[in-house]
Image (cartoon, helix red, strand yellow):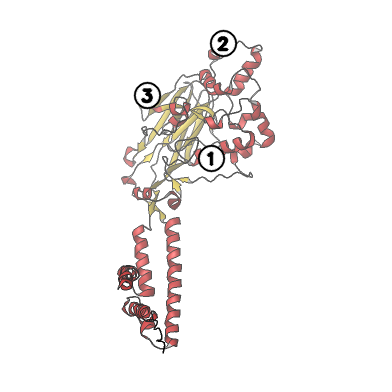
Amino acid sequence: MEQQRIVPNRKKPATKYYREFLVGSNVHGLYQIGKTPHILEKTLWTFLLIASAYYAFSLSYMTIYRYYTNPTVISVDRDRYLWTTYLPAITFCLSNNMNETALDEILHTVRPANSSKLKLFLTSLFYSNLSTLHSILEDDQIDPSNYLSTIVKLYDNTPPTITVSGQVLNTNDWLAQTFTEMGLCYCFNSPLAVYFSPKYQPWLVNQQTILPLSSTFELHPLDGEVSANIANVSTGFNVYIHGPFEVPDVRRRPLVVPNDHLLQVYYTALSIISSEDTKTLRIRQRKCRFYHESNLTHFPVYSYLICRMECRIRLALNLCGCVPHFYRKLRRFASKGKIDVFLNFKSLLPLEQLISLEHINASCFCLANCEQVSYVVEEMDSRQWFLKSNIQYGIKNFPEMRFKRDIIFRFSDLLVYFGGVMGLFFGCSALSVMELIYYFTLRLYWFIKS
């Protein structure tokens, strides 16, 4: 009689190992599944475990989503004697400061066939800004790559006098010429002004270089009334007040200082700062950027309004393949080389929409500044003055509060929350998770090998 072959039952050791895990596990509910012989009890405990796992993972997902999208809080800080605020930065654009001698020298050097036409073109180019871009006359006798240097040559560089609380400042250290969307202007008390200056060398060679921060005036409540005076300006000018780490907004109406007038204006300041801990977060978590965290193509530093400027550059490139002359240009985004592309720009898009970036199909997502100061006019007075045009501005009353962005939900809080969820729904801890990993890795390996 042929001997029947006996096939070993391999299910019994596996079942035994599985039941040993269920009975020995610290996770609540697994013991009942492994020990209870009745099928209804096993089904009940299995359903309860599945329901617990569902709610545990749902709450964990919401917690992770909160940590990655909204872990910060903005609170009010009223301890005014422990912090300082910035003296407002000022950008002022002169209304009539073309150097006629420099204009005659350019005409003599170029020797145009029609000097009157070239003179009108240079005048329209010199006084042009984003709002008057269409008023630039047509002329091809000046290469577009030389527009900025030509404007600098035509600029009357007679510097004004700057004093802060009676202290006379060196204009070479505190005052910078800057190319803005309002034309070539002066800027005072802004560390970002140097990046828009004709003297910023990395601009000329298309590099992105962040320079050390320059000095800015900071005010303390014990300083009393602090004001800056910009005097002996040869002509009237438009004034834009902004934070030191921001640029002037082309959408805002400027303060106008007429010829031979004195404008006195005082502001109240409202600051938003961010704690050092927020720098450890990702940008998408805190939803703001510091000035050195630029993701822009044309600018090495970041601010909300600089980001808006880049949006206008991208829009201009998409519509006409050109960049207005007062914007920084990169070699791979070179202009077509003719001023008539700006004239054709009018038929493609009204300048009002280019300035506001509204009602157009343009992706412009700009995050707020992590640290910024907003200023609101508190007092203003204008009168005729016998010493040319002047402006006196400052902060008369120190702010009594400021806003502070800080972390309210840290990574350690996330771990504690996970531990609470695991303890609530499964009655286990981190060691239980390690035990689970051990059972299905190292212990399983030795079990199979034996």
- Residue 293, how many percent across, how many down? 42, 42
**Residue 327 visible in rendering:** no
- Residue 101, how many percent across, how many down? 54, 12
At 47% from the left and 46% from the top, the residue drawn is 368
Q: Amino acid at mark 1?
A: Arg
Question: What is the C-alpha distance between the residues marked 3 and 2?
Answer: 34 Å
Q: Quadrant of the N terminus?
A: bottom left
Q: Label 3 crowding class (10 Å Cα cut-off): few <14, some 14-19, many 20+?
A: few
Q: Amino acid at mark 3?
A: Asn
- Residue picked out by circle 2: 109
At 53% from the left and 29% from the top, the residue drawn is 331
Reading the chain from its start, which is encountered first: label 3 or label 2? 2
- Residue 6, how many percent across, how many down? 39, 84
Where is residue 450, by image quadrant?
A: bottom left
At 48% from the left and 31% from the top, the residue drawn is 91
| Looking at the image, residue 412 lies above or below residue 107 | below
- Asked if disc 1 and disc 2 are in contact, CB closer than 8 Å, the reply is no
Which residue is most to the right? 347
